Amino acid sequence: MLLLAVLVFSLDWQGMVKPGAERKKAPVQAVVVDASKLDSEIQRQKQLEENKQREEQEKLKRLEQRAREAEQKRKQEEARITELKRKQEQEVRRKKDEAKKQAEAKKKAEAKKKADAKKKAEAKKKAEAEKKRKAELAAKKKVEEEKKRKAEEKRKAEAERKRKQEEAQRKAAEQELNARLAAEQARMAAQRQSAMQRMINEYGQYIKEKVQRSWIRPPGSASTLSCTVEVRLIPSGEVIDAQIVRSSGNPAFDRSVEAAVFKASPLPVPPDPEVMEQFRSLRFEFKPG
């Protein structure tokens, strides 16, 4: 209603009169107000009031926020100051403890220094006594070693003399033994050689006789014919080859001798392997008896 009255009295009713028209007093009449405009104005005023209240509330919230932040900063500052005091007190206690420890360490260092000096003096005294004892022991040991060295040299000289004497006796006995062995070996070798030669001659004669028995004289051959034949044998006495190395001049006679050799196979051979080696290739003169 208040707004309606303001609108009514704020309208310029005289300005609505046409220019040039004669002004006449008119009787008071009722004014018709547009309801839509009135609602719009009411809504605008209401919106302004709400905006104002909202701004006041936001301002109040900002003030409360600032107050809370200030209180938080105050508490933080108080905590910082309290922590700083605590650290200062802790630093004072640490410095006192450090000073106490340094004093104790200094005291211990002085005591250790005195103890080390005492130990050093005792060690020096002990070292000098040990040095003297070692010198006396070394001198005594040197005398004993010299005695032992001379006794050892004498023993070695005597041992060397005996060794040389025994060596000379051993060499003389060895030379005598070697001479005996050489003489015996020479004798045995001569006997062996003589026996081998007898066996060679003996079995050579056996072979000649067997070939002679196996020989058939060719018709018309003279009794004075002879030839030299080379025979190759194996250890069993088997003939593996027979060749005339000196012909009789009569081919039939030569062939008859070769045939007689093969016919007489196996030939008698010595049982001794060493002598048998002499019979692997054997030459002899065939002369009819």
Image: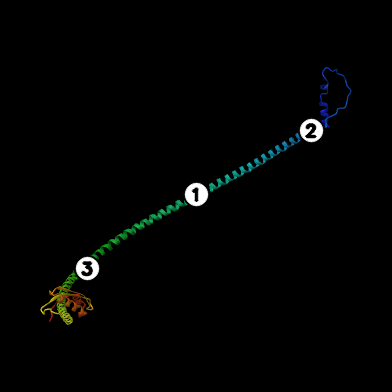
Mark 2 or mark 3: name the one nearer the start of the chain. 2
Q: Are marks 2 and 3 in contact (CB under 8 Å)?
A: no
Q: Nearer the viewer, residue 257 or 27?
A: 257
Q: Which mark is residue 110?
A: none
**Which residue matches tag 2?**
40
Q: In terms of sequence position, does the residue under pointer 1 or pointer 2 come before the other?
A: 2
Quarter of image, res 204: bottom left
Q: Residues within 10 Å of mark 1 (few under 14, many from 20)?
A: few
Say which amino acid is labelled 3: Glu
The answer to which of 138 and 42 lies nearer the viewer is 42
284 is higher (above) or lower (below) than 45: below
Q: Where, by quadrant of the figure, is residue 81 drawn?
A: top right
> Which residue is disc 1 drawn over?
98
Q: Could you tell which of marks 1 and 3 lies nearer the N-terminus?
A: 1
Q: CA distance from mark 2 to mark 3?
A: 146 Å
- Residue at point 67%, 40% (across, down): 65
Q: Residue furthest front?
A: 220
Mark 1 and mark 3: Cα distance apart in space: 73 Å
Q: Classify the position of the N terminus by image quarter.
A: top right
Question: Is residue 138 visible in this depiction of the protein?
Answer: yes
Neighbours of disc 3 within 10 Å: few (<14), some (14-19), many (20+): few
Residue 207 on image: x %, y %: 17, 80
In the rendered view, tell whether residue 64 sits above or below residue 5.
Answer: below
Tell me the kind of residue under disc 2: Ser
Q: Quadrant of the C terminus?
A: bottom left
Q: Is residue 167 above or below residue 12?
A: below
Q: Which residue is mark 3?
A: 152
Q: Position of residue 238 (x, y in %)?
A: 22, 78
Mark 3: secondary structure: helix
